[in-house]
Image (cartoon, rainbow, N blue to C red):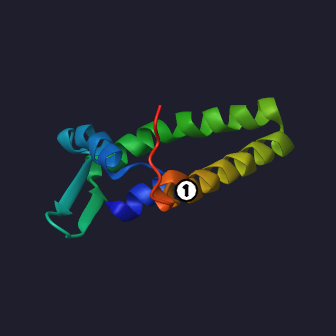
Amino acid sequence: MAELSDSLGLERTSLVRNLQPLRRDGLVTADGGGRERRVELAITAKGRKQVEKFMPAWESAQSTAVQVLGETRWSALLADLEKVASALKIKKSTPPLHSRHGARHHE
C-alpha cells in the first residue's frame, strides 16, 4: 500500500479509505496485509467491466480538454502538474525546519 500511495501522492490512510467502497462493491480485492506485510491489490472482473463502461466518457473528457486548451497548453498543464507533484513529494519527505533543528513553534 505504501508504494501505491506514494506513486499516487496520497497518504496511506487516504488510500485505504478510498479503496473501502471499491472493495465493498467488489471492484477490487486486497489480499495480505497486517503488520509490516505487503498488500496485493487486484481489480476484479466486475471492476474491469466498470472501467470498460466508463473509459469512453473519460477519453471523451480528456479529448474535450485537449480541444479546448490546445495540444500545447494541455502538454504545458500536465508538465506543470508534474512539477507541483514532484515539489510536494520533496516537501513531504523533508522534515519542517523547526523539526530538523529541534526548535519548537510557538504562536
- Image position of 36 (left or right of 60): left
User: Quadrant location of the N terminus?
Assistant: bottom left
> Is residue 70 positioned above or below 88 on the image?
above
> Is residue 52 positioned above or below 32 on the image?
above
Residue at image mark 1: 89
Residue found 70% across the figure and 31% down from its top = 64
Mark 1: amino acid: Lys
Give the camera-side residue of 20 and 94.
94
From the top left corner, tell me how far across and down residue 69 is, in percent.
80, 33
Q: Quadrant of residue 35?
A: bottom left
- Image position of 86 (left or right of 43): right
Residue found 21% across the figure and 57% down from its top = 30
Q: Quadrant of residue 52?
A: top left
Residue found 40% across the figure and 55% down from its top = 5
From the top left corner, tell me how far across and down residue 43 is, in percent.
31, 54
Residue found 18% across the figure and 40% down from its top = 24
Give the camera-side residue of 94 and 57.
94
- Image position of 6 (left or right of 81): left
